[in-house]
């Protein structure tokens, strides 16, 4: 039964929390190591294209008690005017995008309300948080009739404290999800991927002690002779608390005391085996405080540059990569989210001969980065600051910055992460440069141990004389850019004529190249979208790459065909971008073998 106060306030139409939305609680790290209640599975769902469940007919926000968060039931009392009822609504699976679950939701953009009823028995002295792996794009969360808060951004986790809102017995968790695109959003209104809406990753209740280990950083020192970092405690007993960080295999045990801010710093001599693709060494790390303990598997490596070289653990490495969208294999595709999906995607990258993946164009689910740690695959992770962002809108910048902070906070302890990227193909202007410079400063402030970059665009100095003249290149660690010579830019023979030069002495990284074909469609080598054209293109591209001075890596576009509303050639594209080296079902195109053979020759 719900608390009498809640019911009374609902009946009076009063919200427990009026005004604007609370932002999420600071992110709690490594939920896989916590005590949780899994809320994945079948949820009730109500499509609400006009946000009728939230606003009145003048588009003014209703008190919580007059919104769908109240979770009232027409069929329990038909004397009341109630125009919704989750008990007799449709159902949707969580995790999962809604577009591929219902024919009628294939193109749907708007709001869908999700409800999960679950029994709970809160214990005194414990703290509880509801956590979402991701909700695209905006999620407003309510529990037992009251709105808790809102998260914006479709690809990063967030949590809200619900310690004082959970009741013994049945609880009603309701989320209003909206995936409308907006000019001032991040990404903006136009992008080349499907706008999958929904609760696209896992949902759980975290069960934590009153003072718990909220976040931590465990990494190799710059000189490689120590393991250092910090532990952030959260709770009334955080300040002055003792914390230990142990790595049994290294006989490493650091005992430290948290300061008045609840943060404990540590550093202790250690010489761990270095994580690398040939030896993805991970150590069991245990962090303990008076009331809490967390276990993690962490690898230790350094990534840096020297001139035009990328150095992993001080040794030059060539990044044999591939770009990947977060889509599962299958005729329908749809958002990937599970460990199984991650195994399929990263397994295909390995088969291609890759030691590197670019997780485009947004942070992928945590299964991908944790599995990349285990498999020894370096990762480029990025935020969806993509194309024509609203560079002068402070809310847009705050949104982008928040997504950067959430991306880095979630994955700072993942050995596989080597690049944080802040943008993709953004049109040059003073406002864009200012926006991205501040974002780069934010990343470096959060994590000075990875390379920072952005996918820039090329310039043609003279016919077939290619360079990159982007003022952003002064602020990134590598010179990364997308080039489609032979597809958007000329035909295949242009690859053979091109000469390259660069105004900066930095590692050159081609973050996108390629062209497409429909799997199994054959024709002449000069006919677009044929297997033959794609093979000729990849042969000419790989020959051209051999001639590019300072090339340190590449992530051709893209591992598999993926859905995009911008690909309307029926019979060939059918709402798919066909630049995949694999079809949407995972069938290898002929060009797959061209790139694989080139990588295996490196
Ligand atoms: C761009 C963009 C990708 C897009 C690709 C394409 O480079 O970064 O998101 O899918 O081109 O046109 O296929």
Image (cartoon, rainbow, N blue to C red):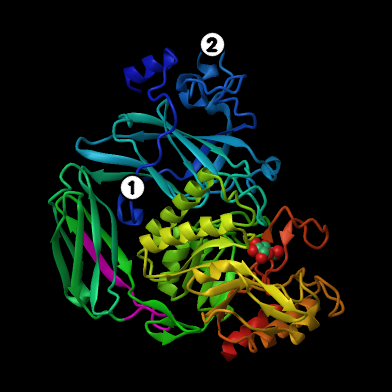
Q: Nearer the viewer, residue 89 or 307?
A: 307
- Residue 178, compared with residue 599, is above or below; it is above
Between discs 2 and 1, the one toward the N terminus: 1
Seen at 72% across and 75% down, the residue is 460
Q: Which residue is mark 2?
A: 80
Q: Does residue 561 appear in this view?
A: no
Assign a secondary structure to mark 1: strand
Give the x, y percent position of residue 324: 58, 66
The answer to whether the residue bearing label 1 lies less than 8 angstroms from the nearest atom of ligand 1 is no
Give the x, y percent position of residue 108: 67, 41
Q: Is residue 588 left or right of residue 380?
A: right
Q: Which range of residues does the magenta coloring cover?
A: 274-287
Q: CA distance from mark 2 to mark 1?
A: 38 Å
- Residue 443, compared with residue 197, is above or below; it is below
Q: Nearer the viewer, residue 142 or 438?
A: 438
Q: Quadrant of the C terminus?
A: bottom right
Give the x, y percent position of residue 493: 80, 83
Whether residue 76 is in magenta: the answer is no
Q: Which residue is mark 1?
A: 36
Seen at 77% across and 61% down, the residue is 573
- Mark 2 residue crowding within 10 angstroms, few (<14) / some (14–19) / many (20+): few
Give the x, y percent position of residue 329: 62, 62
- Residue 52, compared with residue 504, is above or below; it is above
Seen at 66% across and 72% down, the residue is 458
Seen at 49% across and 47% down, the residue is 399
Determine which of the numbered discs, if any, sits on residue 174 in the image: none
- Residue 219, compared with residue 40, is above or below; it is below
Assign a secondary structure to mark 2: loop
């Amino acid at each position: 039964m719900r608390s009498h106060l809640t019911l009374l306030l609902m009946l009076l139409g009063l919200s427990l929390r009026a005004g604007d939305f609370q932002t999420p609680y600071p992110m709690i790290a490594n939920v896989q190591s916590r005590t949780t209640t899994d809320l994945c599975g079948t949820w009730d769902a109500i499509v609400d294209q006009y946000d009728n469940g939230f606003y009145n007919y003048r588009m003014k926000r209703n008190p919580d008690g007059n919104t769908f968060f109240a979770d009232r039931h027409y069929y329990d009392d038909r004397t009341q005017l109630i125009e919704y009822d989750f008990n007799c609504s449709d159902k949707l699976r969580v995790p999962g995008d809604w577009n591929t679950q219902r024919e009628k939701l294939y193109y749907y953009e708007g709001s869908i309300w999700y409800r999960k009823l679950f029994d709970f028995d809160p214990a005194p002295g414990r703290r509880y948080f509801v956590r979402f792996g991701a909700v695209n794009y905006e999620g407003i969360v309510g529990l037992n009739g009251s709105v808790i808060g809102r998260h914006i951004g479709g690809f990063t986790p967030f949590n809200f404290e619900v310690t004082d809102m959970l009741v013994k017995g049945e609880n009603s968790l309701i989320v209003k999800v909206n995936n409308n695109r907006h000019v001032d959003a991040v990404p903006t209104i136009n992008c080349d991927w499907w706008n999958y809406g929904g609760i696209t990753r896992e949902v759980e209740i975290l069960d934590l002690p009153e003072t718990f280990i909220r976040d931590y950083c465990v990494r190799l020192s710059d000189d490689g002779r120590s393991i250092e970092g910090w532990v952030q405690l959260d709770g009334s007993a955080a300040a002055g608390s003792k914390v230990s960080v142990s790595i049994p295999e290294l006989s490493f045990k650091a005992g430290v005391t948290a300061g008045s801010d609840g943060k404990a710093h540590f550093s202790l001599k250690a010489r761990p085996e270095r994580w690398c693709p040939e030896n993805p060494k991970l150590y069991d790390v245990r962090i303990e405080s008076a009331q809490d303990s967390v276990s993690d598997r962490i690898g230790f490596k350094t990534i840096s540059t020297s001139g035009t070289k990328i150095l992993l653990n001080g040794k030059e490495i060539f990044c044999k990569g591939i770009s990947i969208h977060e889509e599962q294999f299958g005729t329908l595709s749809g958002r990937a989210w599970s460990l199984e999906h991650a195994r399929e995607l990263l397994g295909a990258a390995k088969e291609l001969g890759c030691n590197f993946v670019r997780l485009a164009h947004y942070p992928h689910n945590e299964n991908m980065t944790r599995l990349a740690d285990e498999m020894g695959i370096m990762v480029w992770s990025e935020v969806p600051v993509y194309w024509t962002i609203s560079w002068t809108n402070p809310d847009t910048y705050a949104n982008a910055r928040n997504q950067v902070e959430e991306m880095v906070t979630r994955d700072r302890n993942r050995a596989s992460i080597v690049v944080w990227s802040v943008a993709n193909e953004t049109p040059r202007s003073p406002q864009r440069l200012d926006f991205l410079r501040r974002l780069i400063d934010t990343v470096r402030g959060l994590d000075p141990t990875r390379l920072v970059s952005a996918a820039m665009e090329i310039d043609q100095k003279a016919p077939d004389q290619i360079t990159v003249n982007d003022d952003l290149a002064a602020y990134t660690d590598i010179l990364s850019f997308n080039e489609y010579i032979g597809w958007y830019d000329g035909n295949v023979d242009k690859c053979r004529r091109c000469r390259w030069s660069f105004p900066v002495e930095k590692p050159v990284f081609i973050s996108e190249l390629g062209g497409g074909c429909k799997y199994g469609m054959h024709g002449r080598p000069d006919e677009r979208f044929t297997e033959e054209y794609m093979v000729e293109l990849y042969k000419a591209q790989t020959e051209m790459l051999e001639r590019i001075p300072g090339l340190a890596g590449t992530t051709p576009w893209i591992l598999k065909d993926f859905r995009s509303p911008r690909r309307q050639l029926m019979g060939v594209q059918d709402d798919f971008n066909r630049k995949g080296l694999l079809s949407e079902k995972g069938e290898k195109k002929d060009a797959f073998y061209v790139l694989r053979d080139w990588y295996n020759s490196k």
